Structures are given as structure tokens and as C-alpha cells.
Image: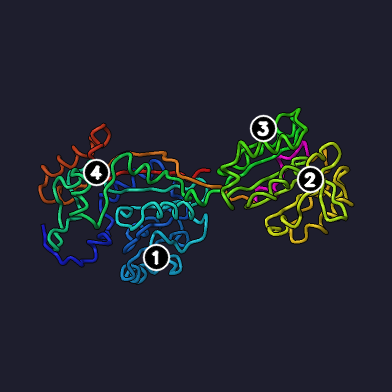
Amino acid sequence: MKQLSSDTKFAHLGKPGTAFTSGFQRRLDQILKLVNLDNKSILDQGCGEGVWLEKFSEYTDWDKIYGFDIDPESVELLKKQNPNLKSENIKVCPGEELEFDDETFDIVLSNEVLEHVVDDKKVVAETLRVLKPGGKFIIFTPNRGWPFETHGAFFRGKYYWGNIPFLPWMPKVVRKKFSLHVRNYGHFEIKKVVTANAQEESETEKVLIIPGFNGQIKDNWKEWAFNELRGVDVELLDLPESNTNLSNSLNYIESKYSDVLNSKGRVSIISHSAGAGIALKLSEKYDLNKLILVAPVVNATKDNSLELQNYYSQLGSYDLFKLKENINKVTVLFDAEDSVSGKDRTSYMIELLKGAKFIELKGKGHFTHHENVSTLPELLTMFKPVSKFKIIHHSHVFPGFDKLARKYGLFGKMIQKFFHLIEKTPLNFFGISHFIVAEKVY
């Protein structure tokens, strides 16, 4: 154990690997059993001096290899030592604020990095953002089952580098006193961090679909919401098919979905056909994020009001002045040749709803539109799915024991072999690190 200055850089940022050891190779071999690296775009989280990046070049092109690190000196050294790397692919930034575009990478590797970051949940959320759908997040991070704290400890203002026995097994209050600079994770704790919803509750959007009153239309919308709008918190309002009294339907919706409707700016409504009447009424009372009227069956009149057609007129006219306050939130999907909400009515709506977005569904027709509503691609671009991680593998690995094997020869190699064998047994619970592969899903 060595006594070092309390401001020693690697005490706080972690000590990056300077060579691709046999221990790293063991980890790579385990990764390759589960993840295909061939021709993939790969991001190394906390890339340090780039030993993993160099190895990845055996599987994919250099222009598909990326990395970032919070330490500018490590990144500068990395760029000097690896002329094949594209300089713009390597960033100096924290894991909580990645300087990469959404859905850029097939694979993100986090090799003993997550324990050092300021906000591990935010790092996971950022990783989720930059991964493509179906992309893999590969994690190695300290396991609390291992009896040694491998990152040293602080004591009376001094930093001691080495393996501190039994500190990971101490109560949290004790661990935090001596190892504020690093985390280790219990089995269920790390699973919770990785699979937590990437968006805060205050940011999530709820989508209510009002499908009108035809049973077949409801089935089509249900199929569309289930198959296409994955990852969005969506609910199809199950109004009674026989209920053509919109006042009763409105009361039913307001009663059942009161909490959702009152969550300002977090609820959107998609209405179809005669469901537009309810949607317009709800827009008068509630602060909606989006209001989308699909083939609305309404009459637009020149006295500055909208009203439902035919026997759906119980709700009367609508307060367009209230609607116009948030007109930028309104989108109307229409067919100008629609036999029910046709050209004249559409032109009135365009005139009255200036500022709303109108998207023409050319040639689909009212009845065809009813039957094929689940094929509308126009709607898919309006909602960003809430993605998450699904853990597809979780085990624990033991150290490579390279130094032990070199120092003690045959005896050291026997110990090394023993621990590597028990990785395949339940005793891997005591391994030094979690090994997790998580997949981005919706």
C-alpha cells in the first residue's frame, strides 16, 4: 500500500490501462461470445490512452472508432500515439454530457468507468441517447461481492493506493467515509441503475388516442399504437361503441384521466374522425403538448366557430380564441377530397386555424383512411419513443491475476486458473466486477 497526495489525479478519475493485458483479453473474449464487433461503430467510454480503441481496430474501421475522456492530457496523448484515429472522433467531455449525436453508435463500452462519474444515472441516460436502437451497452464495473477496494482509500486527509480489505462489505456510511472518490455496486443496485427510465418523470409524455366510435377503427388504432408507437406512453380510450353522446363521453374521459390531463404540457391527444369533437373540447380546458386531428369530422363555419357534423353536434361550437393561444401545438391531417370532411370544410378550417400545421393525406379518402389508419407514417415522426435498456447478460468476473502468475510462477498460475474456473459457478458472485450487456429497446 502506498501513501500518495490526496490530489493524485487517478484517485479521482481512475487509473487508465496503458497496455492491453491478458486480463483485458479475457474480457474481450467474453464480450465476443455475446456481441458482434465486426464493422460496428464503437464508442469507448473513458478511453484514457486508447488501449481498447487500438484493439477495436481489428474488428472495424478506424473511422468507426470513437472515444471520450474527461482528462484532456490523456486525450492529447492518445491522439499523438494513434495517428490512425480520426481526431474529431475523440472528445474531451464528461459522460453526463456527451458531444455526440443521437443514435450514432452500435456499441458503447464502459470498462471500469461508471464507478468514477459524478452522476451514474445521467451517464446511462446519455449512453442510451447516443446508441442506435438495438445497440449494446457493455459494462464492467466494481462488484461489492469482491472483498477488496481496489481504488485505495482516503484516511485523515491522505490517500492510500492499494487493495483495502473488506471495505466493500462495510455499511454504506463507512464506505463513504473512506472512499468518496469511487462507487461499487451490489447485484441489484447496478441493475436498477442500468434499467432505470432514461427520462425523468417530469419529461415523459402521455399520449391519449380518441378513435371515434366505430369498432373497426378502434381495432386499427390499437394495432397501430402497439406495433408502431413503441416506447411512447400511449393509451387508447375505450369509449363504448354505442355511446354517440359526446357530452357523456367527455365527462367519462375527464373523470378517468383527470390526473393525466392536469399534468401541464405532458399530455398529447390524437383524435380521429368524430373524436375531434372531444379533442377540441379538451383543448379548451387543458394545457396540451400536442393536439393532432386526423381526418376530423367537423363543420367549419364562417362565424368563427367549429362544430361537429350531423348527430355528433351535442357539444356545440368551440372556443377558437382559446385554441389559437396554443395554435402552434395543433396539427391537422386531412384529405381534401374526403367525401365527409371535404374541400370546403377544410378550407374553412385552414382559414380559422391559421398557425396550425396541416398535412394532406393525398388520395386516401375518408373510408379508406378509416380502414388503414395504422399505416399513417405521418404520425410516427411526431412522437419520440422513450427508450430504455434491457439487460441481456449479467455475471461477475474475477481479475486476470497476471501479476500473480508472473510473480509466483506455477503456483500463481494455479490460483489464476482456479478463480477463472469458478467464474462459471455461483461463486462468481464474489467476482471483482460486474459484466453486463444491455440492449437499447423501446
Marks 4 and 1, how far apart at CA: 28 Å
Residue 238 image label: 3
Of tags 1 and 2, the one toward the viewer is 2
Residue 93 image label: 1
Marks 2 and 4, how far apart at CA: 58 Å
Identify whether 8 is placed above or below 317.
below
Q: Secondary structure at mark 3?
A: loop
* Amino acid, disc 2: Pro
Q: Earlier in the sequence, mark 2 or mark 3?
A: 3
Marks 1 and 2, how far apart at CA: 48 Å
For the N terminus, the image quarter is: bottom left
Q: Earlier in the sequence, mark 3 or mark 1?
A: 1
Stretch in magenta:
370-381
Residue on which the image places disc 2: 296
Residue on which the image places disc 4: 144
Marks 3 and 1, how far apart at CA: 48 Å
Identify the residue shown where x is 27% and y is 51%: 183
308 and 3: which one is in front?
A: 308
Q: Earlier in the sequence, mark 3 or mark 4?
A: 4
Neighbourhood count class around disc 1 (C-alpha, 10 Å): few under 14, some 14–19, many 20 upward: some
Residue 41 image label: none
Look at the numbered discs 2 and 4 and tell me whether their residues touch, using CB distance below 8 Å.
no
Identify the residue shown where x is 82% and y is 52%: 305
